[in-house]
Amino acid sequence: KTALHYNIGMYLKDHSDLDSSQIFSVVHHLHLSCSLLTNSTKLEVVDLFIKAACVAKKFGSLEQTLSYSLQGKEILQSHFDSEEACWELEYDRSYELHYMICDTRAVIKQSTTELSNDFYVVERFIKKPLHRLRFYRINANYLSNLQNFKGVLELGLRVIEEYGYTTKENISLEEFREDLLRFQQSVKGKNIAEAFASLGKCSDEVLPPLLEFIVVTLIAAYFIQNVPLFCSLMLLCVSITLENGIAGASGVTLTGLAFGMLACFGPSKECIEYAKAGLKIAEQVEGSYFNMSLCMNWGGVVAPFFATISETTEIFERGMYFSNQCYDHETTGYLMFNTVMIQCYYGMEIPYLLENIKVYKEALDVKLKKGRSDVTVILSGVYDSLYFLLDAQTCGANRLQVVTPQMLEASPGFYQFNYKFFHMVAYYIANDPEAILLEPIVGSLIHFSPGILTSYDYYFYSPLIRIRAATTKRHKIELKKYLDTCIQKLEAYSKFKAGFVFRALIIRAERRLLDKPGSFKVIGIYNKAVKLAAAHGAFHIAGIAAERAYQFHLTNEIVLGADGCLNQAHQMYHKWGAI
C-alpha cells in the first residue's frame, strides 16, 4: 500500500498543476509513502511541500499551511544526521520551512511550547540580518496576541539596538516635544508632505522590514500607556525614512506619528498635516497589508479634523480590507470599533448603528473562529449601550453576546475604558443613576485610551454627570475648575472642526450657571447648541442641549418655553432613534 501511495504521488507530480490545489493530492500521497523516499528524491519532495504550504496559505488555510510545513521539515531533517547539518547544508530550505511554521503557529496557536522552541532556533541558526528580523517580527506579533505588551517592548528595544539605533525607554513628554521640534526644524522649511515627496525609494533591504518591526513594537508602548515612547519610536521611523528613502512602512509611520501627536498634545495643524501626508504616501507606495491596515487605522482617527464622516468611514473600511488580508483580526476589531465610534460621535441613528455593529461582529466572529473573544468586547459594549436606549420591541433588535465581568476584567484597559464609557453615556441619557457611579471609574481608565475620540467625548459627558451628582452649593463651586478644563479640551477640537463646537457650548452654559444660576443668557447658548448639533445630524447632542434648557426653566420656575424645550428634546431623541 505504501508503494501504491508513492507511485500515485510521483505520477500526480508529473501530471498536475502544481500551482493549484492539485498539489495537495500530490503531497498527501508522498507523505504517506515518505519511508520510500531516497536521498536523491527527498529534496525535490521537500520543495513540493514548501509549494503546497504556500498554496494553502494563499487560500487562507493556516492549519494546512502549518501541516505541510511541518511534514516538509520532517522529510528535510531525515536527510541529515543532525539539525545543525541540515541548517548548514540546506539553509534556504530550512529557513523557508521554519518561517512558515513560526508564522502560522503564531496566528493559530495562543501559547505553545513548540513555538517557543521555534524562536530559539533563530538564535542558534539564523544569521542573516534580514532573516533574523523577519522572525523577530513574528515573535513580536505572537507576544502581542498574548497581550504580553511588556515582552513585545523588551524584545523590540533589544532588536532596535541590535540593528544600530537607540531610543530612550523612559522618555518624558517634554523630551519628546523637544525631539519633535528639532526634527521639524531639520526639514528646513518644507512641510512633511514636500519633504517625503522629494525622496527616492529606499535601497537598503533591511530597513523596510526594520521599520515594520518597530511599528509592532511601538503599538505595545501605547498599550502600556507609554505614549511618549510610542511617539518617539514613530519619530525614529520617520527620521530613518528621511535619511534612507521611502519604504512600504513610511505611510504608517507618518499617520502613527500624527495619532501620537494627537494623543499627547491634542489636535494641531502639524498633526493633521502628518496624517494627510501618511495617507497620501500609502496610496503611492503601498506597503504590506499589516502596514496598510494600521496606516488607515491611525489616519482614520485623525481624519475627523479634515474629512467628512463618510470619508473617515471609507478610510477605516479600507483598513479592514487590508487587515483581513493578513489575518490580523485584532486590528480589524479596532478598525470596526473606530468606525462605530465615529458614527456614534456624530449621532448616526441608533437602529442603523445596531445593524452595522451586528454585521461587523458577525463577520469578526467568523474570522476569529475560536478564542480571542476579547476582540469583540468593545463592539458588544457599544451595541449593548445603544440597545439600552432603543425601543427594541418596535425595532426588533436582538441582544448580542453578554460580556461578563470576568471577560471585561481580563481585557486590556483600552477595551475597559471604551466599554464602560458607552454604558456611562447610555445611563446618563436615560437619566439612570448608574451613570454617576460609572463616571469616576471611566475617568480612572481614560489614560488607557489617549487620542481616541471617546477620550475627548468623556470631557463632555463627565461634567454633565458631575453636575447631576452635585447636591450642595459647595460641590457645584468645586466643579468650576474642572469645567474650565473640559471647555478648554473641547474647544481645542472645535478650532479644527466646526462640528465639535456645540459640545463646548453646552458645557459653557453649565459653567455660566455655576457662577450665575439664574442667568437667562444660557437659554440662547442652549438654543444655539441645539441648532448647530441638529444641523450636523448630531441629534443626541441636540437632545441633551434642549433637555438642559428645559431643566433650567424647571429650576428657575419659568413656565413660558419650558414645554417647548421638553418637546424639542423628545423630537431630537426620536430622530436619533432613542425612546
Image (tube, rainbow, N blue to C red):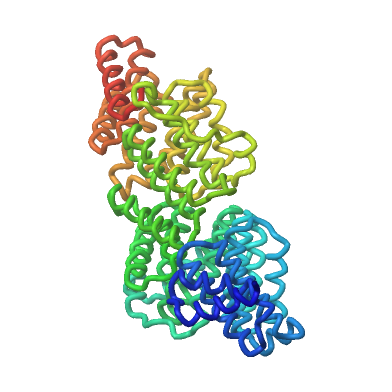
Q: Establish if 314 lies above or below 119.
A: above
Q: Quadrant of residue 73?
A: bottom right
Question: What residue is shown at x 45% (from left), y 60% (from top)?
Answer: 294
Count of numbered circles in the view: 0
Q: Position of residue 391 (x, y in %)?
A: 37, 22
Residue nearest the observer in this picture, 234 or 185: 234
Viewer can see residue 394: yes
As rendered, which of 93 and 568 lies closer to the eye? Answer: 93
| Residue 367 spot, x, y in % from top left | 49, 52
Q: Looking at the image, which residue is at 63% across and 60% down? A: 143
In the figure, is residue 406 to the left or right of 293? Answer: right
Residue 422, image x and y in percent? 47, 35
Q: Position of residue 374 (x, y in %)?
A: 57, 45
Visible in this render: residue 159? no
Residue 40, relative to residue 174: is it above or below?
below
| Above or below: residue 157 compared with residue 466 | below
Asked if residue 555 is positioned above or below residue 7 in the image, the reply reads above
163 with respect to 260 (left or right):
right
The residue depicted at 60 percent of the width and 56 percent of the height is: 145
